[in-house]
Amino acid sequence: MLKRVSLTVALLMLAGCARTAKNVVDDVGKAIGAGGLTSIQYSGSGYIYAIGQSFKPDDPYSKFNLKSYTRLIDYDKGASREEDVRTQFENPPRGGGLQPVIGERRAVAFLSGDSAWNAGANDTPAPAPAAVEERQVQLALTPHGWVKAAAAAANPTIESKTEDGKQVTVISFTLKGKYKVSGFVDDQNLLEKVDTWLPNPVLGDMPVETTYSDYKDYAGVKFPSKIVQTQGGFPVLDLTVSEVQPNAATNIEVPEVARGATPPPVRVESQKLADGVWFLAGGTHNSVLVEFKDYVAVVEGPLDEGRSLAVIAEAKKLVPNKPIRYLINTHHHFDHSGGIRTYVAEGATIITHELNKPYYEKTFSAPRALSPDALSKNPREAKFETITDKYVLTDGARRLELYLAQGNLHNAGLLIAYMPKEKLLIEPDLFTPPPPKTPPTAAVSPYTASLQANIKRLKLDVRQIAPLHGRVVPVAELQKVLAAGKKS
Ligand SMILES: [Zn+2]
């Protein structure tokens, strides 16, 4: 009797071991009804977060109410339409991500084959070629997309793991030759989690974890009621699904402007603000070049390495034969710090608020196999100068003062820069001048109000503002915006 039981157990174990990755993928496909499914639309609500826009470096990303969310996927065409409508969550606003949201803000992201685009103003399509790969990977992270990608993958692997005391089967494969995708399958053959990594200028190979729970049945197709995705360890989406339509009608057509679009070349346009001071614009984010006796300093290394290389080339053209000794980083938000590693590779010292140094030391050491940069190819130790409240860079003649913008809720370590001789203020994200001839609105951002409070507190005599978004303006533009707010 005992022998027969153990023989049965042994046979069962053998059968378990013999289950291949392909068997598991087939079983998941059957369990969630992937076979006859060519498209799906799901919608719901919850929370959405702006990655890399937290108040402090190690805080969760800034949070918004996700009033509505709808995603239509055409698996046959590799197409997707994702629409979200967000409203302000925190009052007063805290952190970045273009807060405060006045009313609601809608965004629509599309993918079809090798084309990506967004809905721009008045729903005019705006090509987004840089987003193609990420959106393709995201398709393979959805439950049915994962089954289809896993079934098509060469040599998927199988592993048994214990997660939170539960036995799961992990199926891994490589997508597009470089993205490792691992699906965690429970004992009901449901996909409960998919892990992958995406390249990020700040975080390097950034872990992306998507969890699926509370599956419900929609005429033979199972779909999770709860979807949570984290990127770099913090949530970016927390969705409660309320409606699912398997095999929904699809009509995602690539608009002419997005067909074959490639990322536009990085443009840097320099504008001389004073002797030895240049505003480096030409894109969505600006930098300021300041010449000292033996070196130059650059205020802000935004976006990514592509932007930094172009800004550095322009700096070398404007001031040949002087090294870039300092890069001043105004705050840790990803769009403002994604390019600072390139300056470290150039030999520059990073000047930043003391809150950021441990964060950058951690993120600088992250692996970067998905998108190697100059610093990962030629590693060197980053040098930092940190600021608590005030720091002055001077050679006796030229003077650049850096201050913590106290009491601002955009970022805990946000720095503003002031040049007393030039009466020039350089600031990120607290005040972005409206385009010329825009009638001032009654709503003044609390971030702009905090800039004014700091100008007063520090008794700065400002004539001109060089914002790190938008155009250089006389200080009167700031006063105009504040005055319109007071009148209302
Ligand atoms: Zn910011």
Image (cartoon, rainbow, N blue to C red):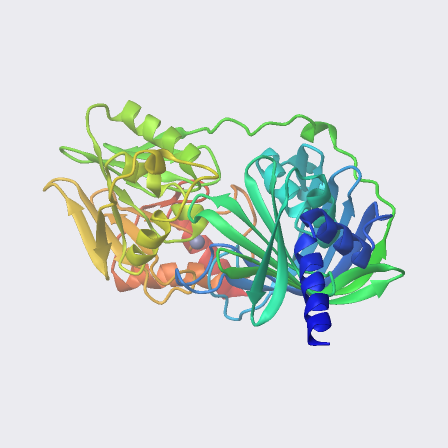
- Total numbered labels placed on residues in the image: 0
In the rendered image, the quadrant that contains the C terminus is bottom right
Quarter of the picture holding the N terminus: bottom right
Q: Is residue 457 left or right of residue 14?
A: left
**Residue in the foreground of this view, choosing between 442 and 334:** 334
Query: Percent position (x, y) of residue 182?
Result: 60, 51
Position of residue 2 relative to residue 137, above or below, is: below
Seen from the viewer's position, the closer of residues 16 and 346 is 16
Q: Nearer the viewer, residue 2 or 245?
A: 2
- Is 488 located above or below residue 197 in the figure? below
Most extreme residue toward the bottom is 1
Q: Position of residue 6 (x, y in %)?
A: 68, 70
Q: Can residue 202 be seen in this snapshot?
A: yes
Residue 282 image position (x, y, % from top left): 45, 32
Observer able to see residue 444: no
Q: Is residue 148 left or right of residue 347?
A: right
Dividing the image into four equal quarters, which quarter contains ligand 1?
Answer: bottom left
The residue shown at (56%, 66%) is 163
Relative to the observer, which residue lies in front, 134 or 385?
134
Residue at image x 74%, y 50%? Answer: 23
Residue farthest left in this picture: 396
Q: Quadrant of residue 454?
A: bottom left
